[in-house]
Amino acid sequence: AFTDAPALATDDPQATLLTQVQGVIAEYEKAKIAERYRRGKLFRARAGEITTWKTAYGYRRIPRSATTGPAHWEIYEPEAVVVRRIFSDRAAGTTVREICRRLNADRVPSPTGKATWGTSTLLRLLRNEAYVGRVYYNRTESVPDRRPTRPNRQVPRNRDEWIPIDCPRIVSDELFQAAARVATDNSKWSPRRAVPGQWLLKGLVKC
């Protein structure tokens, strides 16, 4: 029934060449648009505008408008209270698991809206410099991925390439550093770091 059908366009060398040329031009235009978009975001970030749509827990993103100016973050107090509580508990020496247990017992929703907090979520929150007024753009770059299912992947850039953007602080520098110091001390004195056959407090305890 299909023997009298006309030849497909792909059988014509000229049509095949035209299709390939159109594909190359489309890819070129796509790359140009992506590069212009990237340069535009870099320009806005260097001017102090928050260009990312993802917002840290404790903040709300205010889009750019004629009345509010460039896009920026504002503190969302119901969540900011939880952030201050987490940093205060951590600075006081409370473990991450215990903080999670307390938040779950008080039925505080997690940043994703779930009923339970995870330790990984809490650790990311405690390392986020946005809470002391510093948001960074240009932290990663896209590179080709060797895996066939993913064409690209994100890798970290050097810190000197990051673009700092100011935002309202929720906790003080002292509280942020105190919480980080507890994490460092816990890691330093963990028994898992002890060399077999050596005491953890060797050279530190004197009679």
Image: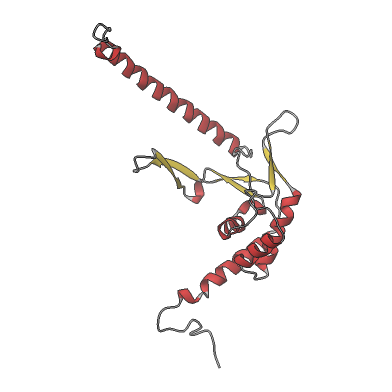
In the displayed structure image, the side of residue 148 where residue 100 appears, left or right: right
Q: Quadrant of residue 205?
A: bottom right
- Residue 10, image x, y percentages: 28, 15
Q: Is residue 177 above or below residue 200?
A: above
Name the residue at 62% across, 57% down: 117
- Colouring method of the image: secondary structure
Q: Is residue 98 above or below residue 122?
A: below
- Residue 170, image x, y percentages: 71, 53
- In the image, farthest residue toward the bottom: 207
- Residue 206, image x, y percentages: 54, 90
Foreground pick, 78 / 29: 78
Q: Is residue 87 above or below residue 163?
A: below
> Dividing the image into 4 quarters, which one contains the C terminus?
bottom right
Q: Is residue 74 above or below residue 199?
A: above
- Visible in this render: residue 67? yes
- Visible in this render: residue 171? no
Name the residue at 42% across, 78% down: 195
> Dividing the image into 4 quarters, which one contains the N terminus?
top left
Q: What is the count of numbered marks?
A: 0
Q: Quadrant of residue 84?
A: bottom right
Q: Quadrant of residue 103?
A: bottom right
In the displayed structure image, the side of residue 188 where residue 26 appears, left or right: left
In the displayed structure image, the side of residue 172 where residue 29 appears, left or right: left
- Residue 175, image x, y percentages: 68, 63
Name the residue at 66% across, 67% down: 91
Name the residue at 50% across, 28% down: 36
In the displayed structure image, the side of residue 35 where residue 53 appears, left or right: right
